[in-house]
Amino acid sequence: MENTEPSIGIDLGTTYSAVGICVGDEVVIIADQYGKNTMASQVAFCDGKVLVGEAAKLQATRNSGNTIYEAKRAMGRLYKDPALKKSLELWPFTVIEQAGEPAFEIDQNGKQIYTPVDISKLILAELKQRASEYLGKPISKAVITVPAYFNDAQRSATKDAAQKAGLEVLQLLNEPTAAAIAFGLAENSDKKRNILVYDFGGGTFDVSIMEIVGSEMITLSKEDQATIDVRALLKEKLNFASLNTKINAEEAVVGGAALQAAKLTGNQFDRVKNISFSDVIPLTIGVGILFDRVVVLIPRNTAYPVKKNVVLTNSYDMQERAKIEIYEGESKTHSKNTSLGNFTIPLAPMLAGRAKISITYEIDKNGTLKTSAEDLATGKHGELTIERENFGKATIFDVEKYLMNKSEWKQT
């Protein structure tokens, strides 16, 4: 039985992107007019025209100032983010600060400004068009992959780009999970296995340890780094003599995304409809309290969707308002973690320690965090409104530092 409606899987990569669709229980990676299954993640502005993919790449050397690449590195980040510093020094095109965020300045018929979301939208629209032409019908739904460490701002930016490209995002799927889906179906075995999946892309290196039984996958742990000698690491730390390279590395992530898209839109083939996986959050999420401390609500490597609640109290006598501050990171002190934002709720004035403030954190299937708080005495409540500038402050190097010192949580 074919899908009830067409849906696609997209690997939106830093250097290359790809699109695939599930036909029956097989994945087709859709090639471009040049016969290539992957497309350069580049957008060029030349003589009043917008060029995307291979066409943009072919003219890049003579039009470097107006050819944007690696826009994914800037998605959902602040202009002053340390993670962008090296890229800003190396990119031949102009990057300006707009409302605290990076934007690309193009010199075509005067100065024009494009955000990272705008560039990603053009790439996604090109992939969508490629799939529509292949199928001979419109496409409006997609599963899009993202790095496992992407925070909420980066995930939201990806969804914004997709929506601007006319795509409904069925799910944002972590890249190692997508690769594991492709691997699990390719192996076609009911044997229980623990596997390490690494996704070494143009901009990120994601590692996930997963348990696979048939088409059911459970993520056990995640680690992320920016650059690394992959084979040396695996051989030294894990004593791997060789790597499984049966899966085409360029197609594994997009293939997994296409399979998940097919499942979510009604594909009834057993190998597709029985796909099941549980993903985890890469960073601990907590609420900041007095004396620079953090109360953990959701530890790193917790499977989601998940909903957690904690009841806290007022710090001062006759306190009239409570500021709820949300943090992600592996330190017990919130000043060393990344702020995800804050909001304030009114409190009924009473002696310190008497108020009951119920705080709820909920992470949906896309890894998006929603936070709410309520004064149980009055019923007055508030919800987190996430501002983009509150994100992207922690780099992947910060994550590595936190993880190296993660025993801090075990100390009193």
Image (cartoon, helix red, strand yellow):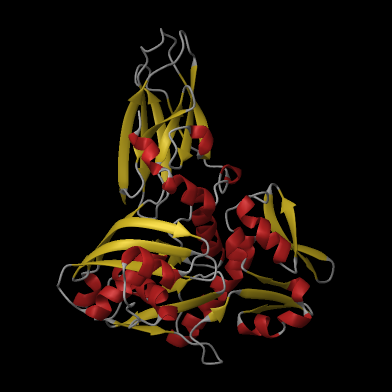
Q: Nearer the viewer, residue 49 or 69?
A: 69
Residue at the image point whose x is 55% and y is 69% from the top: 14
Q: Would residue 377 appear left or right of 226 to someone viewing this image?
A: left
Q: Residue furthest right?
A: 110
Residue at the image point whose x is 30% and y is 71% from the top: 181
Does the rendering let one see residue 298?
Answer: yes
Residue 254 percent coordinates (x, y): 41, 75
Q: Nearer the viewer, residue 284 or 178?
A: 284
Q: Quadrant of the C terminus?
A: top left
Does the rendering let one see residue 304?
Answer: no
Would you place residue 105 above or below residue 346 in this image? below
Q: Nearer the viewer, residue 53 or 92?
A: 92
Would you place residue 55 above or below residue 84 in this image? below
Residue at the image point whose x is 44% and y is 67% from the top: 144
Q: Would residue 245 appear left or right of 277 to someone viewing this image?
A: right
Residue 117 percent coordinates (x, y): 60, 61
The count of marks equals 0
Residue 62 percent coordinates (x, y): 78, 82
Would you place residue 9 above or below residue 158 in this image? below
Residue 176 percent coordinates (x, y): 38, 66
Q: Would residue 137 appear left or right of 188 to someone viewing this image?
A: right
Q: Quadrant of the N terminus?
A: bottom left
Q: Quadrant of residue 220?
A: bottom left
Would you place residue 358 above or below residue 401 in this image? above
Q: Quadrant of residue 298?
A: top left
Residue at the image point whose x is 36% and y is 42% from the top: 362
